[in-house]
Image: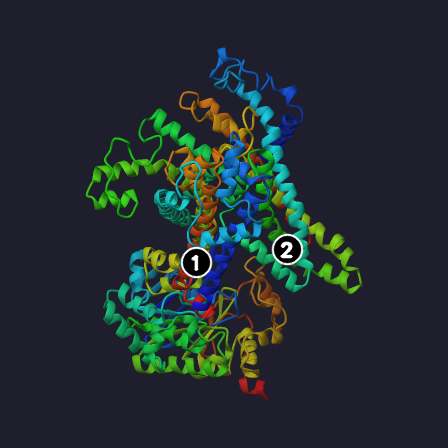
């Protein structure tokens, strides 16, 4: 088990290394003059020369590459030209917002897709099943950025129910930062009103993400539930006099979790990508919006940081899932021992 | 204890079990035997209302005077596992792979409100000991895939016995077990019956089972009862040609049903292609015109009940062996 | 539905090949007097903030949006088929190495990497095409490799090998034709998904630049106006959705044909 985990972690580090190298090659080798690229279109020759020296771009590529890797190991992503601050500091202030949106959406996604799958699997082919399929297909058919804007149109412009964007109303008083997650911090500070404001800002961005992914998630969970319901151990449980609810929650659901988790990993990759798009649409102050605003002005370091951080988050989630499998399915423990 | 009258289990218009009647007495060891597709497992499942979705039951099943076909699902659920225990074949797939063996046994006790938590867990270990599992405390903590096939089948039996039922239905409990383990499991059934005065219905296609243990035998063919009677009569004086073929295969080897196919030409008819008249007639060496025209009904022949127009008389098992 | 989807794709092809014959107006000519007009007979899809005809822009945009998507998937397919076939028929060690490389691509959120690559290459549809091709091929390579290995085990291949058919001819005549059926299905469906990715990157400002009438860019440009001009947001989006749906429907129909057409 430990060996298995070490291998998984080693793999994650390899993937990060590949991403780091790829982005380095692209930003240092492909542009004819990276300094000019970094300085922007209207820079003077002087500025370009200064940047070249400042970034060590006058040194051999290999030396640059090694110092770049060494920097990454120490959490140094370079300096953002746009904000003038180290990218790592910017990340620290923007990452909690991204994670909050990501985890909130993920929780809603898991809960909703399971809930819909349970209802749909009750009578496969029934009216409810078809209805759920149609509804989720509709959501996944819409590009997530378009869906986000459509939600804005409906719930802000037409109904005026929810905010257009942002993470917290400008006029409201933000709670003291403890976890960086506004939903948690407002509760810790005992401000239920602020909690509701934070929640109202979260609803539309997460809805856009979740609606887009629901079709696949529900289909996977539904298939897993139906296949497990036909297994012989279900008949045994009925033979023991176990009622349908307990059969669903104690027997079927636990067995269905393994295939459901497997599909979750892939879906999480999409979710990270969608979060970035959604942050741009909803003006959500996370690392996606930060990187977006940076590359609008040809500031590339934040984009590299975004790629690395999201790969790291994705890897961590995958390792966590790998730890979860054998907890849920004991047969996997002996397989990996 | 159990009276079954004219029981049919149908899928749409097709009757997989077609008008089966028999009684099981208190404390009896009753054997139901037939090839796969004969409807024997459906008959067993029908007693508990555990038939596959899409099937309907008609007729009458009275258990301790109560009409099972009229009981609502809720009450049936109270009977299952409590009054009537059921053991399935192939315990590796019949047990939940992600729940510990002890917890699966305890669940029966918990859902029937006969003890909760710790009490049920202790009881589960006692039950494992009762079915002669060595180191029961350790096995209770194991997952099904971590113990041997014989142990799993014993654990299944412990699960069925958890609430002290008076009737145990065992649906091919020895399939997929090797010969020595099979004998041990059968011995366990015999022992439980002696010591607990348990009524047992054993459903099997395995002729090796018949001889030693059972009191009475019911032979099913293509959804119908071919013959029913005391085990000695069935063994020594089978009246139905199909029973005779079964005995012949059983006498030849311990091997399961494959050998019957060698003894009797052809194969059992599918649900859609049942012949007119006696359903066994295309494969029967003794078939005559009336066998192809009318379906024989059960009638007493030489100590048993058989559904045959031309029963075998004076046939002796010993002749066969010789 | 299948016929409808084919008709829709045929229409898109016409849009892409000869937009000037279909579009009623110049897609980039400004007409400030008629800015943000709702849909009417004069402007089927309304007008944008510069008074340009949204319908004409959508028609002209087909070439960019759909053309780039098709180019991405086709180039990824060419590379993926070669790569996957090599992995499928090659020796074990080669297969192992090639598939580990593919696995790396499944280790990160693909669209984020594409975003980083496109941003590094500079704005423009070419960058988007390169970036998305780079992340697109591994999926196809994995599919091809699996198919090759599956079909290699089939009796007709075994038989061909037994009678001494050369390895090259084995691959070209006995394995690849079956693999390609699978690839065709995948390519068809993937063009729809690539369209979503292309428009997403354009939406972020990485792809086509104004005033190119690319669909994703249209949606990006509508951001400041759609609250009062729904048509500006709705029609480009509907085109993307309809194209994606048509691609999946056609892909599904190809898949069912393949199942009935080939003896196992």
Q: Is residue B311 above or below residue C70?
A: below
Q: Quadrant of residue B319?
A: bottom right
Which residue position is annotated with label 1?
A319
Please give left or right for residue B3 compared with residue B302 in the image. Answer: left
Instruction: Check residue B307 in the rendering and tell me which mark sits there, or answer none.
Output: none
The answer to whether the residue labelled 1 contacts the one labelled 2, judged by CB atoms less than 8 Å apart, is no
Chain label for disc 1: A
Q: Residues within 10 Å of mark 2 (few under 14, many from 20)?
A: many
Q: Is residue B316 above or below residue C71?
A: below
* Residue A297 showing in the rendered view: yes
* Residue A268 showing in the rendered view: no
Residue furthest top in the image: C33
Residue B277 on image: x %, y %? 56, 63
Residue furthest bottom in the image: B322
Chain label for disc 2: C
Q: Please give the count of numbered marks on the rendered protein.
A: 2
Residue B25 on image: x %, y %? 34, 74
Q: Is residue B252 above or below residue B162?
A: below
Residue B184 on image: x %, y %? 42, 83
Q: Is label 1 in a helix, a strand or a loop?
A: helix
Residue closest to the eye, B52 or C8: C8
Q: Is residue B58 above or below residue C79?
A: below
Q: Residues within 10 Å of mark 1 (few under 14, many from 20)?
A: some
């Amino acid at each position: 088990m430990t060996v298995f985990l070490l291998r998984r972690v080693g793999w994650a580090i390899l993937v990060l290394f590949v991403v780091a190298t790829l982005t380095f090659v692209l930003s240092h080798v492909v542009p004819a003059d990276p300094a000019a690229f970094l300085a922007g279109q209207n820079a003077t020759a002087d500025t370009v020369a200064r940047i070249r020296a400042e970034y060590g771009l006058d040194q051999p590529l290999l030396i640059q590459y090694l110092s770049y890797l060494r920097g990454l190991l120490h959490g140094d992503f370079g300096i953002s030209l746009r904000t003038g601050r180290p990218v790592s500091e910017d990340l620290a202030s923007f990452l909690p917002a991204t994670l909050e949106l990501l985890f909130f959406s993920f929780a809603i996604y898991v809960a909703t897709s399971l809930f819909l799958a349970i209802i749909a699997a009750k009578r496969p082919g029934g009216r409810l099943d078809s209805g759920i399929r149609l509804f989720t297909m509709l959501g996944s058919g819409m590009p997530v950025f378009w869906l986000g804007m459509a939600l804005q149109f409906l719930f802000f412009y037409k109904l005026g129910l929810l905010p257009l964007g942002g993470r917290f109303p400008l006029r409201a008083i933000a709670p003291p930062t403890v976890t960086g997650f506004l939903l948690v911090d407002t509760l810790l500070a005992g401000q239920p009103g602020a909690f509701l404001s934070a929640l109202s800002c979260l609803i539309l961005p997460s809805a856009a993400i979740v609606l887009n992914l629901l079709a696949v998630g529900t289909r996977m969970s539904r298939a897993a539930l139906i296949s497990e319901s036909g297994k012989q151990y279900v008949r045994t449980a009925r033979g023991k006099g176990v009622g349908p609810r307990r059969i669903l929650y104690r027997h079927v659901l636990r067995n269905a979790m393994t295939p459901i988790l497997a599909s979750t990993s892939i879906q999480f990759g999409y979710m990270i990508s969608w979060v970035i798009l959604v942050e741009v649409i909803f003006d959500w102050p996370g690392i996606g919006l930060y990187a977006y605003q940076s590359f609008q002005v040809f500031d590339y370091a934040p984009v590299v940081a975004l790629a690395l951080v999201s790969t790291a988050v994705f890897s961590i989630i995958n390792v966590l899932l790998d730890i979860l499998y054998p907890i849920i399915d004991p047969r996997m423990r002996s397989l990996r021992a | 204890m159990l009276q079954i009258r004219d029981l049919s289990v149908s899928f749409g218009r097709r009757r997989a079990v077609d008008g089966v009647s028999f009684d099981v007495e208190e404390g009896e060891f009753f054997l139901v035997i037939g090839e796969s597709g004969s409807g024997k497992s459906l008959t067993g499942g029908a007693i508990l209302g555990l038939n596959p979705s899409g099937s309907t039951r008609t007729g009458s099943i009275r258990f301790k005077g109560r009409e099972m076909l009229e009981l609502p699902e809720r009450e049936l659920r109270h009977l299952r596992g409590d009054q009537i225990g059921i053991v399935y074949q192939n315990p590796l797939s019949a047990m939940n792979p992600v729940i510990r063996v002890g917890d699966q046994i305890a669940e029966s006790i918990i859902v029937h409100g006969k003890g909760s938590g710790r009490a049920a867990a202790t009881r589960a270990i006692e039950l494992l000991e009762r079915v002669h599992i060595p180191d029961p405390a350790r096995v209770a903590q194991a997952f099904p895939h971590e113990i041997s096939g014989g142990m799993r089948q014993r654990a299944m039996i412990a699960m069925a016995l958890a609430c002290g039922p008076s009737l145990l239905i065992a649906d091919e409990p020895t399939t997929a077990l090797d010969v020595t383990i099979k004998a041990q499991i059968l011995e366990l059934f015999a022992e439980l019956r002696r010591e607990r005065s348990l009524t047992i219905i054993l459903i099997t296609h395995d002729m090796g089972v018949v001889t030693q243990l059972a009191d009475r035998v019911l032979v099913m063919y293509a959804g119908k009862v071919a013959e029913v009677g005391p085990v000695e009569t069935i063994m020594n004086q089978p009246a139905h040609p199909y029973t005779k073929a079964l005995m012949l295969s059983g006498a030849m080897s311990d091997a399961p049903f494959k050998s019957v196919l060698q003894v009797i030409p052809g194969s059992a008819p599918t649900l859609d292609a049942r012949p007119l008249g006696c359903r066994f007639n295309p494969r029967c060496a003794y078939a005559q015109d009336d066998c192809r025209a009318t379906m024989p009904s059960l009638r007493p022949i030489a100590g048993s009940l058989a559904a045959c127009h031309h029963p075998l008389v004076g046939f002796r098992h010993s002749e066969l062996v010789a | 539905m299948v016929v409808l989807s084919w008709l829709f794709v045929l229409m898109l092809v016409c849009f892409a090949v000869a937009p000037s014959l279909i579009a009623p107006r110049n897609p980039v000519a400004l007409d400030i007097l008629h800015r943000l007009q709702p849909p009417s007979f004069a402007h089927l899809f309304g007008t944008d903030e510069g008074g340009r005809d949204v319908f004409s822009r959508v028609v002209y945009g087909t070439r960019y949006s759909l053309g780039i998507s098709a180019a991405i998937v086709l180039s990824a397919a060419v590379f993926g088929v070669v790569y996957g076939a090599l992995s499928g028929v090659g020796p074990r060690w080669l297969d192992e190495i090639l598939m580990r490389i593919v696995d790396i691509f499944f280790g990160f959120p693909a669209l984020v990497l594409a975003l980083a690559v496109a941003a590094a290459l500079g704005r423009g549809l070419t960058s988007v095409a390169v970036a998305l091709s780079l992340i697109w091929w591994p999926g196809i390579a994995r599919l091809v490799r699996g198919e090759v290995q599956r079909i290699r085990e089939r009796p007709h291949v075994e038989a061909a090998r037994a009678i001494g058919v050369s390895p090259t001819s084995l691959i070209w005549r006995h394995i690849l034709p079956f693999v390609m059926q699978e690839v065709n299905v995948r390519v068809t469906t993937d063009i729809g998904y690539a369209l979503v990715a292309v428009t997403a990157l354009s939406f972020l400002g990485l792809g086509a630049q104004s005033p190119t009438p690319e669909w994703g860019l249209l949606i990006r440009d509508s951001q400041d106006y759609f609250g009062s001009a729904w048509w500006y947001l709705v029609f480009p989006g509907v085109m993307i959705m309809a194209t994606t749906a048509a691609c999946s429907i056609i892909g599904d129909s190809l898949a069912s044909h393949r199942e009935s057409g080939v003896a196992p």
